[in-house]
Image (spheres, rainbow, N blue to C red):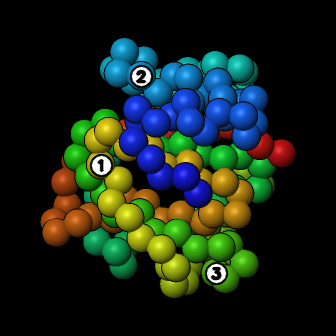
Amino acid sequence: MIYAPNTAAANYRGIHPGLDLALAKITPEFLAAVTEKRQELAGSNVYVTGFTYDTLPLEETFFEAHKNYLDIHIMLSGCERVELAPPDTLTEFDRKEEADFYALRGTAQQSLVLSPGHFLVVFPEDAHRIKICLDEPQTVRKAVFKVRFR
C-alpha cells in the first residue's frame, strides 16, 4: 500500500512501468478530464475510470482484492474511509476471476480517510474495503487507475 499526497506521485516511480505511467497522470489537468467512461492509457494493461457514488455504512460494505491488477484510488471530491487487510486473513464469498475481482469479509488491519489531494495504491496483497462513510453518507467522485501488475 502507498498513501501519499498527489504532489508526491513522482516519488514512487520505478516500482513498475505501468504504475509509472499511471502516476505520471496524477495531475490536476488530467484528473479534471476523467469521466465515467474507461480511458485506456496502455490498452487493458493501464486504464482509468471515474466513479460517482454515495458512501455507505460499514456494515453495507465488503473487501475486494485483485490477483493481477493494482488499483490507484484518487478522491476528486468528498471523503471516504478505506480499510485494508491481507486477503489471506479474510473469507472469500464471491469471485469473478475473468474480472480479477474477489469479494471478501473480515476484520480490517488498517484504516485511513481518502480525501481530495491524496492517492492510495493497493497492490494484490492489499484487500481493500472502500465506500465507507465517515459520519454520514455523502456523494463522492473518484478516479481509479487499474494497472496490470502480474
Residue in the picture at 72% in, 34% down: 14
Q: Is residue 107 above or below residue 19?
A: below
Q: Is residue 34 visible?
A: no
Mark 3 is on which residue type?
Leu
Residue in the picture at 41% in, 36% down: 6
Displayed quadrant of residue 13: top right
| Cα separation between marks 3 and 1 | 26 Å
Image location of residue 132, percent across then percent down: 33, 65
Q: Disc number at residue 90?
A: 3
The residue under label 1 is 115
Mark 1 is on which residue type?
Ser
Q: Is residue 9 above or below residue 64?
A: above
| Cα separation between marks 2 and 3 | 35 Å
The residue under label 2 is 27
Image location of residue 85, percent across then percent down: 58, 73
Q: How many marks?
A: 3
Q: In this rendering, would 52 be left or right of 144?
A: left
Residue in the picture at 73% in, 40% down: 15
State the SS at label 3. Answer: loop
Image location of residue 49, percent across then percent down: 50, 31
State the SS at label 1. Answer: loop
Q: Is residue 120 above or below residue 143?
A: below
Labels 2 and 1 touching (C-beta < 8 A): no
Mark 2 is on which residue type?
Thr
Nearer the camera: disc 2 or disc 3: 2
Q: Is residue 131 above or below residue 16?
A: below
Displayed quadrant of residue 40: top right
Q: Earlier in the sequence, mark 2 or mark 3?
A: 2
Q: Nearer the viewer, residue 117 or 30?
A: 117
Label 1 crowd (10 A; few <14 / some 14-19 / many >=20) = some
